[in-house]
Amino acid sequence: MVTARQKCSRAGVALRCGAATFLLVLTGCGGGQGHGESDAKPPADTTTRALSATPVPEAAHSLTPSGTADGATEAEVLEVYGLMWAEQIKAYRAASADGTDLRRYTAPDVWAAFEADLARMNKERTVMRGDLRHDPEATVPAGAQPPAATVKDCVDGSNWQALDTTTGSRIPPPPGRPARYTVTAKLERANGGRWTVTEYTPHRTRPCQGLSGT
């Protein structure tokens, strides 16, 4: 099996403290400064839906070429994973998946977990601001049927911040959590179709060493 690596300067996930294990990283109860975002208190009539208009920069991709067919397959896996990642950022900035393609890249169980967490955020009037960087690596076992892949990712949430839209105040992250943590994912491609994220698991207390110098 071969591995391919993708570095992304912008794109992300994080869940608020107290959320289910699956999304514990996404909102993460805060995390850092806004990436080109204002921390000023939103107007009283501002809704999370209106915040979805915030422009989100596209993820920058840099694949390490392997020169093999397997390497090309893993590049496809990383591309889909990166697209899902970018759509997550859009959704968590607005506490809503409306106007995003997040569902397009996720299996029903993964989508349902995101949808439930976004609904909770919307109810609590919280959104995410800032920037999540990550450094994923994909592995595609030879001969798997249906074709399957695993992704191991190192996520830097030091600049990913939860914001209370009612008060405009930042929600601090829980103490003792590493700024850089591990995420694992599984993807499958059924019947020759597109790759889909079938499992997504943030390991919020497991630190990682990637992203140094990026």
Image (spheres, rainbow, N blue to C red):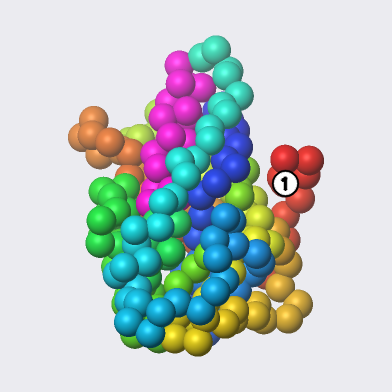
Question: Residue 128 location, x and y as percent?
Answer: 49, 68
Residue 61 in the image: state x and y as whole percent.
53, 32
Please identify the residue farthest to the front as the structure is shown: 43
Q: Main secondary structure of the magenta part?
A: helix
Is 86 included in the stretch rendered in magenta? yes
| Front in this rendered view, residue 52 or 3 | 52
Look at the image and tell me whether residue 21 can be seen: no
Q: Amino acid type of disc 1?
A: Gly
Picture residue at 23% right of the left edge, 34% below the top: 193
Quadrant where the N terminus lies? top right
**Residue drawn 32% across the image and 76% down it:** 47
Residue located 45% across and 41% down the image = 58
Q: Going by the image, does 212 lie left or right of 172?
A: right
Look at 57% across and 55% down and name the residue there.
Answer: 36
Q: Could you say which quadrant of the image residue 114 lies in?
A: bottom left
Name the spot of residue 73 as percent of width and height, x first.
43, 26
User: Which residue position is annotated with label 1?
Assistant: 210
Other residues around mark 1 within 10 Å, as few (<14) / some (14–19) / many (≥20): some
Q: Per the image, is 26 magenta? A: no
- Residue 109 as seen in the image, left or right of residue 4: left
Magenta region, residue range: 69-87
Residue 211 pos. (x, y %):
71, 45
